[in-house]
Image (cartoon, helix red, strand yellow):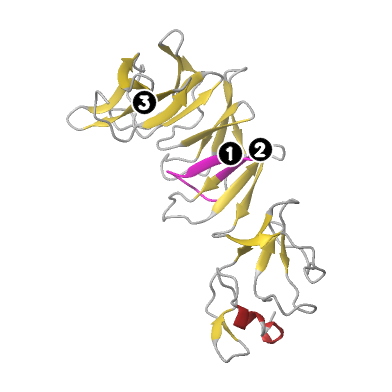
C-alpha cells in the first residue's frame, strides 16, 4: 500500500480490494482509502472518508462500500456511517446507528447491513440492522453475550457470531434467524462425526435447547450415552457437542474419562457402552 495501516478494514468491490481507514504511527487514525487492482498489481488512492476511523467495520452492499462506526482520531466511539460510490469516487454520510460502536463486526444478510456487538461503555450485546431502501437503522434482538471484535459470517440465511471478547475471551457461538428475530446459543465446540444416521437407537429423551437429542445405547453398543448429538438437515452431518465436567465415568476396561468429552469414543470405549451412566 502507499500508506502503512493498522486497525483498518478491507473489502472487495467490483473485483478490487479496498483498504479503508485505520491507524498510522505518528499520524493517528486515518480517513484515507486505497484500492488494489489485481490486473495492474498496483494500489491507488481513492476519495477519503469525511471522518478518520480505526477499528471500524466495512462491508459491501448494493455495489457500494460502507464504513461503520469505529474510533475517531480523538479516541471517541463513532455512531456515524459513510457510503462510498465507486462510480462517483465519493463518500456520503448515511443514517447513523443508534449506538456508537468501536470494533463492531458488520455483515450483509438479505440485502441489509448488520452491525454486531463492538465496544460502547463496555462490550456490547446489541445488534442493529440498516435498510438502504429506507436509509434507516433498527435494533434487532440482542445476543445473549456481549461480544466485541467478534467474528461474524452468514451461512444458509442465518448470521453466526463466533467468539469475541466480553470481559473475557469467548469460545461460544450464537446464531441469528432473521425470520424469528432471535438468537440461539450454539455450543462451544463441534466435531464432525460422519453422515447422518437413521438407526433406531438415536431416539429422543426429551427436548434440549438448540435441538439436541440424547443417543440411546439400549439397542446398539456402538455409541456412548454421554454424548449429545445435534440434528442436522438431511444430507448434512452430525456434530458431537459437549462440555468437560469434573465427574468421571468408569468404563468397562477400568479406565475413567469425563462424562462428556469433545471427542468420539474409541472402539474400545464403544464396546463398554452399556456400563456408561446416562
Q: Is any part of residue 4 visible from this angle?
A: yes
Q: Name the residue: 45% across, 26% down.
A: 12
What residue sits right under mark 3 in the picture? 20
- Residue 130 is situated, as x and y percent measured from the top left of the image, at 57, 26
What residue sits right under mark 1 in the picture? 154
Instruction: Give how far apart the Cα atoms at labels 1 and 3 are.
Output: 22 Å
Instruction: Give how far apart the Cα atoms at labels 1 and 2 are.
Output: 7 Å
Q: Look at the image and give the residue range highlighted in magenta.
A: 145-160
Q: In which quarter of the image is the N terminus?
A: top left
Q: Residue 15 colored magenta?
A: no
Q: Name the residue: 72% across, 85% down.
A: 274
| Label ID, residue 157 | 2
Q: In which quarter of the image is the C terminus?
A: bottom right
Q: Is residue 244 above or below residue 93?
A: below
Q: Name the residue: 67% across, 37% down.
A: 178
- Residue 96 is situated, as x and y percent measured from the top left of the image, at 49, 23
- Residue 162 is situated, as x and y percent measured from the top left of the image, at 51, 48
Residue projecting furthest to the top: 88
In the picture provided, is 55 more to the left or to the right than 99?
left
Amino acid at each position: 500500500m502507499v500508506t502503512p495501516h493498522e486497525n483498518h478494514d478491507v473489502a472487495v468491490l467490483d473485483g478490487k480490494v479496498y483498504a479503508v481507514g485505520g491507524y498510522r504511527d505518528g499520524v493517528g487514525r486515518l480517513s484515507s482509502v486505497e484500492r488494489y487492482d489485481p490486473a495492474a498489481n498496483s494500489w491507488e488512492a481513492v476519495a477519503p472518508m469525511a471522518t478518520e476511523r480505526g477499528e471500524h467495520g466495512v462491508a459491501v452492499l448494493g455495489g457500494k462500500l460502507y464504513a461503520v462506526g469505529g474510533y475517531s482520531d480523538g479516541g471517541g466511539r463513532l455512531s456515524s456511517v459513510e457510503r462510498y460510490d465507486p462510480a462517483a469516487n465519493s463518500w456520503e454520510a448515511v443514517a447513523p446507528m443508534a449506538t456508537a460502536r468501536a470494533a463492531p463486526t458488520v455483515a450483509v444478510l438479505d440485502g441489509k447491513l448488520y452491525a454486531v456487538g463492538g465496544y460502547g461503555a463496555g462490550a456490547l450485546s446489541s445488534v442493529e440492522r440498516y435498510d438502504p431502501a429506507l436509509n434507516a437503522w433498527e435494533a434487532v434482538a440482542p445476543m445473549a453475550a456481549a461480544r466485541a471484535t467478534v467474528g461474524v459470517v452468514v451461512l444458509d440465511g442465518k448470521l453466526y457470531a463466533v467468539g469475541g471478547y466480553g470481559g473475557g475471551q469467548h469460545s461460544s457461538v450464537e446464531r441469528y434467524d432473521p425470520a424469528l428475530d432471535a438468537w440461539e446459543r450454539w455450543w462451544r465446540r463441534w466435531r464432525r462425526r460422519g453422515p447422518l444416521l437413521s438407526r433406531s437407537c438415536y431416539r429422543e429423551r426429551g427436548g434440549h435447547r438448540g435441538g439436541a437429542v440424547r443417543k440411546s445405547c439400549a439397542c446398539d453398543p456402538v455409541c456412548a450415552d454421554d454424548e449429545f448429538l445435534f440434528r442436522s438437515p438431511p444430507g448434512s452431518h452430525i456434530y458431537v457437542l459437549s462440555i468437560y465436567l469434573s465427574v468421571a465415568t468408569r468404563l468397562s476396561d477400568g479406565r475413567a474419562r469425563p462424562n462428556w468429552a469433545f471427542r468420539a469414543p474409541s472402539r474400545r470405549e464403544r464396546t463398554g457402552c452399556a456400563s456408561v451412566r446416562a
